Image (tube, rainbow, N blue to C red):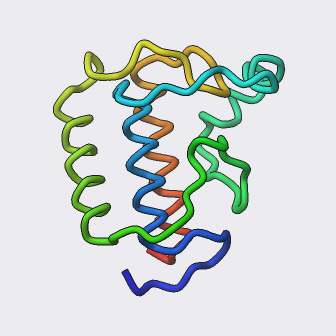
Amino acid sequence: ADSPRQWGKMNQAQLMHHCVHGVKLAIGEVRLKRSFLGRIIGPLVKKGFLSDKPFKPNLPTAPELVVSGQKDFEKEKAELLRLVKKMHEGGEAGATKHPHGFFGELTPKQWGETQWKHLDHHLRQFGC
């Protein structure tokens, strides 16, 4: 909760809330409409997105996933842990069948990879 931010604008509690929504996307609890730009270039950059390379700092995010306002760190952290456990226990069958808002169709394995990379990215954002 007190780790200093290395880049970006979110504080620690906002980061947890943002990651909660990322996992909700992967398990189908939240859906985003396909973006126009994503329909055009999403398939072209999906391979790089799914590579072993970590995400670069300050990548853009979907407007629906931008977090503002005050959030409760411990509440958001508990929810994130609950959802990660739910995703793990659901396995590939628990992954959403809905397309990613930018990249389009993802396999269950790819949904898992995107979540791992997303969480890793934001943990590194706070030096974890």
Residue 23, given in percent of the width and then of the height, sits at 39, 40
**Res 26 quadrant in image:** top left
Residue 11, given in percent of the width and then of the height, sits at 52, 74
Write the residue at 61% across / 26% down: 101
On screen, residue 30 above or below 62: above
- From the viewer's perspective, is 95 left or right of 107? left
Write the residue at 50% across / 37% down: 114
Residue 88, given in percent of the width and then of the height, sits at 23, 36
**Res 38 quadrant in image:** top right
Q: Residue at the far front: name it.
A: 69
**Split into 4 quadrants, where in the image is the C terminus?**
bottom left
Q: Nearer the viewer, residue 104 or 109?
A: 104
Q: Nearer the viewer, residue 21 or 104?
A: 21
Write the residue at 56% across / 63% down: 68
Q: Nearer the viewer, residue 15 or 54?
A: 15
**Split into 4 quadrants, where in the image is the N terminus?**
bottom left
On screen, residue 62 above or below 119: above
